[in-house]
Amino acid sequence: GPGLVVAVDGPGGSGKSTAAKAIARRLGLRYLDTGAMYRAVTQLALEQRIDIEDAAAVAELAERAVLTSGTDPDAPTIAVNQVRVDAEIRTRAVTNAVSAVSAVAVVRSRLVSQQQQIITEAVDTAGGIVVEGRDIGSVVAPDAPVKVFLTASTEVRALRRSRELGEKGVDDVARTLAELGRRDELDSTRKVDPLQAAPDAIVVDSSGMTVDEVVDEVLRHIAAAG
Ligand code: C5P
């Protein structure tokens, strides 16, 4: 039968990546991290010293860049022009620049059509895919039968992100909180495809939940949607 598409959207630090990978593993599906694609274009722009506020230059770069996404939930990968950039895309420099790059309409249209190709292939050949991002349920896969909007309080998200970055001090957490707030604001207010819950998404607030609890809740929802 046709494969399943599960859309997982939400802000940074909501636990999207961990939950989306676990759901894909449990269901034997592929996994696509669309944020990694926006990060990869951003990393390339920084490496080539392109002014990220120059939308035309960023658009041109995105049109030339060839992205390759590995969709194994146990070992997702991302390459730009055949060069793996899995670690490089997680730096603070990339994280703080990505919202400007992802606000460029040409960047989005190009990445969205690539994401749709990856989804179609996974649906046709691999039983389906769990796709995480900001606009999956609303724009990339509006027909997905299962849409999850994962969220958590800003404080919880900053603490999680800080822990991921290996930070210890309260100053670090405060800085991460400020940066996360700024990125949320940019991602939610941009003109093209802002971060938002699709009207038919189930909203899960993971603030007081473990990863397993989030995964179980989504799996129950999938089973019920049958
Ligand atoms: O999910 P992650 O934090 O890695 O995403 C990085 C950035 O990529 C987001 O802050 C957002 O600017 C952009 N993004 C997007 N649309 C998506 C996924 C990510 O605009 N579908």
Image (cartoon, rainbow, N blue to C red):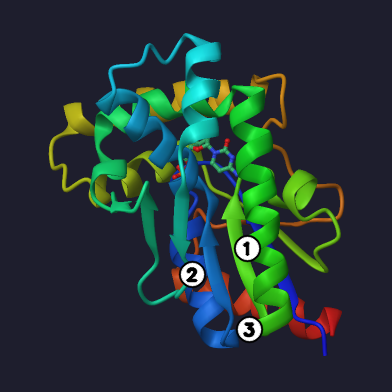
Which residue is the site of mark 3? 126
Q: What residue type is labelled 1?
A: Ile
Residue positioned 35% across, 16% down in the render: 50
Alpha-carbon span between mark 2 and mark 3:
10 Å
Disc 3 crowd rating (10 Å Cα; few below 14, some 14-19, many 20+) is some
Q: What residue type is labelled 2?
A: Thr
Disc 2 crowd rating (10 Å Cα; few below 14, some 14-19, many 20+) is many
SS under mark 2: loop
- Residues marked 1 and 3 touching at CB (< 8 Å): no
Which residue is the site of mark 2? 71
Of pointers 1 and 3, the one earlier in the residue sequence: 1
| Relative to 189, residue 89 above or below | below
Please identify the residue farthest to the left as the structure is shown. Answer: 169
Which residue is the site of mark 1? 118
Of pointers 1 and 2, the one earlier in the residue sequence: 2
Residue 83 left/right relative to 155? left
Q: Name the quadrant containing residue 203.
A: bottom right
- Residues marked 1 and 2 touching at CB (< 8 Å): yes
Residue 174 left/right relative to 139? left
Please identify the residue farthest to the bottom as the structure is shown. Answer: 1
SS under mark 3: loop
Between 206 and 85, the one nearer to me in the picture? 85
Between 67 and 35, the one nearer to me in the picture? 67
Residue positioned 44% across, 48% down in the render: 36
Residue 56 is situated, as x and y percent measured from the top left of the image, at: 55, 12
| Relative to 100, residue 198 above or below | below
Residue positioned 67% across, 83% down in the render: 125
Q: What residue type is labelled 3?
A: Ala
Residue 43 is situated, as x and y percent measured from the top left of the image, at: 33, 34
Of pointers 2 and 3, the one earlier in the residue sequence: 2
Between 54 and 201, the one nearer to me in the picture? 54
